[in-house]
Amino acid sequence: MSGFLKLLFRNRLAAVGAVVLGTILVLVLITPLLPLKDPNVTDTANKFIPPFTEGHLLGTDHLGRDQLSRLLHGTRLSLAVGLAAAVIAATLGSAVGIIAGYFGGRTDNVIMRGVDMLMAFPYILLALAIVAALGPGLLNALIAVAAVNIPFFARNIRGITVSLAGREFIDAARLAGKGHTRIILTELLPNVLPTIVIAMSTTVGWMILETAGLSFLGLGSQPPVADLGSMLGKGRDSLITDPHTSIVPGVMIFLIVMSVNLLGDGVRDALDPRLKSGALSRPRAMTAVNRKGPVPETDDKGLLNIQNLETQFHVGPRVYRAVNDVSLHVKPGECLGVIGESGSGKSVTALSVMGLVASPPGVITGGAVRYAGEDLLGASYKSLRTKRGENVAYIFQDPLSTLHPLYRVGDQLAEAIQCHHKISDAKARARSLELLRAVRIPNAESRLRDYPHEMSGGMRQRVGIAMAMANDPDVIIADEPTTALDVTVQAQILALLDDLRRERGLAIVFITHDFGVVAQLTDRVAVMYAGQIVEQGRTEEVLSRPLHPYTRRLIACVPELGGGRRRLEAIPGLPPMVDKLPRGCAFAARCDKAQDSCRAAPIALSRDGDRAVRCLFPEEALRKDAS
Ligand code: SF4
């Protein structure tokens, strides 16, 4: 609850709305206790007294009734009716929406067509028709306002329910033998409740306004009882001669509706998990760069050279140090493997190269990324966009989210080529066909006309690989590209990438969890842990003689075909959260060799030629060898 309030009051407009609405609510709640005049007692001798007159702070109306007293009593009534209408509409509308969405089929059709018929009428006309049928009066106005808002809730909640009703947890509840009522109350309702609260908070202002509108037309509260709408309606007759009779209730309606809407928007943002994490804020076209220190001097190590890269995620007061002082390079024709557990910073490092980390919340705070000597972190968006796909291409992990679901794969491949090269559609199509054949897609010609959903996971992955190769890039960054493939296809794709780098001098950065792939494809390997490189070296050296305890234990987790019977030791514990990194070695909590000195201060990366390790006590065997 305190977290919700913190999020709510971080939005200044919502805080203003809460203060204004809170003040009004307190005033109307204590109204019966205040020494006010009777709101209905007339005194025609003192009619239209202007505000700030002694005994009448807000003046009097056309019958000499005290405006302040009528305003507070009227506000009390308007708020009560508006809130009651909102609760009734939300309850009935949500119930209708949940039933339609959960049962689906004919039930859904019958209910929703009824709702559509109601929505076909302009809602204010519908409210007028209902009051005309029931007769004027505040209770009838409440019924009318609630009734015209039921379809709004029903439509909203039905949409959410439909998306939830087919989910696995609902199936699991059914299989567990729960009845429909229990599933609706215990599984669906808790999930749709935030949406109901959000819809209510953003519509209650409207309902107060609609109630006031009906009273303004004389269909709501009846004399002598005052509500804001009827006060405004009566004040209209003397708008020119005595404007205070209209201005006073008008300002109150404005304050209530504005404060309710501002607070409602704040509640919606604080309750919506996507909005509060900033996921719906539109990311920039390239990652924000805010380097704190100087740009490292170029050391001309490779075609792609990442130097002391630091990438962070700033979420509210938290700073997630996802990539921390990472240096990697890859030469033409070379394959560099990057390996580590999930969350170790491999993908963020790869995405930082071409400024693809979503900003906000991602920020590159230090280091340099050089392609052929040019610092990409200081490059303009135009220059970066030209290089994306043309010089440095990506094969992403999840092909389903990489490919556009509404376009045929052939069109997407052709578009990727025509973005960088002015060639005819026929040539682009021919090149697309060639690429699909190159990644061993059977019946490539007919597959060009497929949509992504018509292909299997492995096929889509191969289309992703074809797309990365579309413009003959110099560097390919492959983020676990073969995870979704079966071993035969995986072997074919690895052989294809291997051929490409040997024939065309393609540089590959290959991110993977799989030591088998590392051994088969890569020349050098970098092991990442908690956003840092902990070991780097030539692949055969790292695999045969790991220096860092983490690398040793990662390798020990891999079963060896024909290697005899042995226990596969999982690494105990979990990697540290990157917003709470320990002062010393990040692996200390899981390391069987940790000592006090490991925890005392940050551990530097010690280098010896190609080999580098971030450990105070590297493996004994190698130390002996080294000596
Ligand atoms: S520095 Fe210490 S805790 Fe860290 S990996 Fe080396 S031995 Fe283990």
Image (spheres, grey):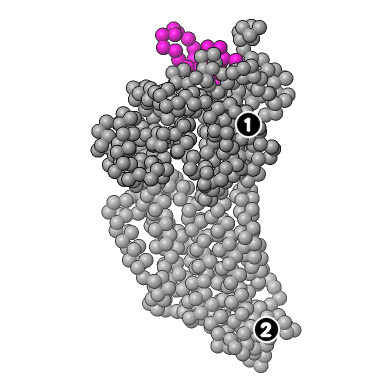
Residue 546 falls within the magenta-colored stretch: yes
In this picture, is 250 found above or below 439?
Answer: below
Residue indicated by mark 1: 298
**Residue 592 placement (x, y as % from top left):** 62, 16
Residue type (three-letter) at the residue carrying disc 2: Gly
**Residue 487 placement (x, y as % from top left):** 36, 22
For the point 48% across and 27% down, the residue is 507
Which residues are the magenta region? 543-571
**Residue 453 placement (x, y as % from top left):** 32, 40
For the point 58% across and 31% down, the residue is 306
Q: Secondary structure at mark 2?
A: loop
Mark drawn on residue 158: none
In this picture, is 286 found above or below 196?
Answer: above
Between circles 1 and 2, the one closer to the viewer is 1
Displayed quadrant of residue 238: bottom right
Q: Earlier in the sequence, mark 1 or mark 2?
A: 2
Disc 1, disc 2: CB below 8 Å?
no
In this picture, is 456 found above or below 183?
Answer: above
Residue type (three-letter) at the residue carrying disc 1: Thr
Displayed quadrant of residue 355: top right
Q: Outermost residue, bottom direction? A: 45
* Viewer-nearest residue: 95 or 614: 614
Main secondary structure type of the part rendered in magenta: loop
